[in-house]
Amino acid sequence: MTESYRSLDAEALVGEAIRRANGRDDFGALPFLEPMNRLIASVNQESRLNEIGEIIATERVLSHAVNRLNYVADRVRYPEIATQRIEKPVFIVGLPRTGTTILHDILGQDPDTRVPLTWETMFPSPPPLQSTFTSDSRIAACAATFPGVELQIPAFKAMHPMGAELSQECVTMMGEAMCTPLFHNQFRVPSYQDWVDDEADWSHVYTMHHQQLQHLQSGVARDRWVLKTGAHLWGLDHLLATYPDARIVFTHRDPVKSMTSYASLTALVRSMGSNEVDPVEIAADWSARLHKVLMRAVAVRAQAQYPNAIFYDMYFQDFVGNQFREVEKIYVALGLPMTALSADRMRAFIADNPPGKHGIHRYEPHEFGVIPEQVRAVFATYIDHFGLEPE
């Protein structure tokens, strides 16, 4: 912890969230304050934040708290939200850095597909409407938050493109449940992440997730939801219990590349708010955590307790070799209709977003203490099961 760091105060943050939510003070029946307090304690004790990091962490907690208050209040104000049916949602699930973001954005080009957009997950209240979906003032408000990130860590865009009208991950939406691996990616909060990994009840996360989809769908509906995040590895059993007819694209890549790339991303993100970022610690910490939840998810899948769910395995090397061909295979496997318009829009997006458009994400295993042979030994069962080749 740096000397300049001032501890976050849970009571003060709750009061400020209520003020920003125009006096709304009901966080709902699902857990929120208890996991928030866990996060704040971990931030205060372990995060090693500097003054900028303190501001970032404060605003991160506040944004999720305000959104939670608004989700709960809007559900009362707009009763039609609770009537929404979420049927056969598509989830993209897998280790980090396996092509999930660009795949999500490509699938989002289908006019029959609904993806959560960054602006509406950042400012969800009131529920977005079809009539103003492309002109809502919240789009500009969201876009205004990006220049600061680009200024502080210009390399971030090469790793993870940003945009108010680009798709957003469920890992961010999980912040409204205060149970998400996002926080340990952004801040060094290992004791909080231990709770997320081993103790948290993820059923509450998916109850909230379902309510969030109902909220966003109530004014802007499509034929299907397409959602993504590697964080679904933590709660795949609860995802399937909530959405037993889910269609799941499970992405796969050489774990050496995935672990190194994710360590690079995490180190870069944490550097925004800390002067004490240890890349080797990050790689070792996250590799162990991700291996555990990956194998847990593989075991859930092997149990085959959800006969109405469909899984499709997508290999990173196949995807980068021909993105649209892999998309076509996904549509066939999941039983999704592809119109000529859908195909044209997805092909156009692929053509306009070639690899390296925003720069090249360069990283080497030795920079993070990653020894390829050791990683492949740890992940050997996974590698053998899915027939993964070294990149």
Image (spheres, rainbow, N blue to C red):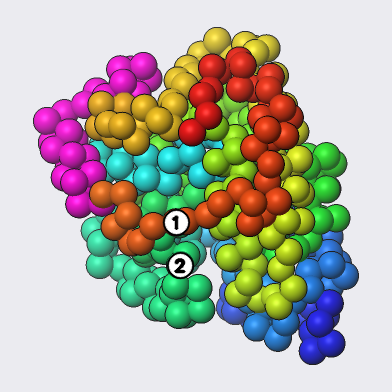
- Residue 88 lies in what quarter of the image? top left
Q: Is residue 60 visible?
A: yes
Mark earlier in primary sequence (2, 1): 2
Residue 155 % position (x, y): 45, 67
Give me the residue at 59% from left, 65% from top. Answer: 269
Q: What amino acid type is highlighted by mark number 2?
A: Ala
Say few, some or many: other residues with alpha carbon within 10 Å of mark 1 (under 14 / 14 to 19 / 20 or more).
some
User: In this rendering, is residue 327 above or below 16?
Assistant: above
Please state if 33 lies on the left or on the right of 111 as rendered.
right
Question: For this rendering, which residue is in front, 41 or 221?
Answer: 41
Give me the residue at 39% from left, 57% from top. Answer: 360
Residue carrying label 1:
361
Say few, some or many: other residues with alpha carbon within 10 Å of mark 2 (under 14 / 14 to 19 / 20 or more).
some
Give me the residue at 53% from left, 59% from top. Answer: 74
Q: Which residues are magenta?
A: 328-353
Tell how many labels: 2
Residue 141 % position (x, y): 39, 76
Question: For this rendering, which residue is in front, 261 or 91?
Answer: 261
Are the two marked residues, 2 and 1, in contact with CB atoms closer than 8 angstroms? yes
- Residue 356 lies in what quarter of the image? bottom left
Question: For this rendering, which residue is in front, 263 or 96?
Answer: 263
Q: Is residue 330 magenta?
A: yes
Residue carrying label 2:
155
Residue 59 % position (x, y): 63, 75
Quarter occupied by the N terminus: bottom right
Q: Is residue 151 magenta?
A: no
Q: What amino acid type is highlighted by mark number 1?
A: His
